[in-house]
Amino acid sequence: MKASLGCDHAGYELKEFLKAELLSLGHEVVDHGTYSTDTVDYPDFCGPAAKAVASGSADFGIVIGGSGQGEQIVANKVHGIRAALCVNEYMARLARAHNDANVIAFGARILAKEYALEILKVFIATSFEGGRHGPRLEKITAIEAAESGKA
């Protein structure tokens, strides 16, 4: 699978850790930055990471900041993105199984690196269940289309 990564300065170290782990597991990685701990604005990096997923050039995205909140918000502004801030494996499983989330957001000041990796593994391994969740996603898509003027 191909992952699209984006982070701010607070998420840089976690991004680098997860990137190395993903590569060691055989995944491809597209790194949209940032590339240091110098202070930056997260929309500049998390937006492109989400756009890569929305365009189909990546299978899933990872956005990382201090709390993950702003990064999730930015990703969710991209048409076609369903980003979920996950702080444990249960949330990651439900985000994929029930919401078909295609971007996961992490707070580097919230999670230990090793635990973030375990959460990410669950996110990657979980498939969308469909069923009763399908019509709900269709409603989300309809709201998104109406709000973007594409309805």
Image (cartoon, grey):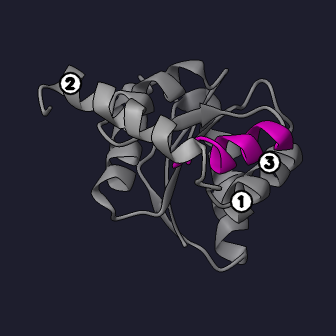
Specify whether residue 34 is in view. no
Q: CA distance from mark 1 to mark 3?
A: 11 Å
| Up-down relation of residue 66 to residue 116 (above or below) | above
Q: Which residues are magenta?
A: 89-102
Q: Nearer the viewer, mark 1 or mark 3?
A: 1
Q: Residues within 10 Å of mark 1 (few under 14, many from 20)?
A: some
**Marks 3 and 2, the one that precedes in the sequence:** 3
- Camera-side residue of 34 and 134: 134
Q: Residue at x 42, y 63 (%)?
A: 58
- Camera-side residue of 120 and 22: 120
Tag of residue 119:
3
Residue 97 locus on image (x, y percent): 68, 50
Q: CA distance from mark 3 to mark 2?
A: 33 Å
Tag of residue 27:
none
**Marks 1 and 3, the one that precedes in the sequence:** 3
Which quarter of the image is occupied by the C terminus?
Answer: top left
Location of residue 74 (image quadrant):
top left
Tag of residue 126:
1
The amino acid at mark 2 is Ala
Q: Are marks 3 and 2 in contact (CB under 8 Å)?
A: no
Q: Are marks 1 and 3 in contact (CB under 8 Å)?
A: no
Residue bearing mark 2: 146
- Residue 101 part of the magenta-drawn span: yes
- Camera-side residue of 47 and 102: 102
- Camera-side residue of 95 and 118: 95
Which quarter of the image is occupied by the N terminus?
Answer: bottom right
| Up-down relation of residue 114 to residue 86 (above or below) | below
**Marks 1 and 2, the one that precedes in the sequence:** 1
In the displayed structure image, the side of residue 25 where residue 15 appears, left or right = left
Q: Residue at x 58, y 54 (%)?
A: 130
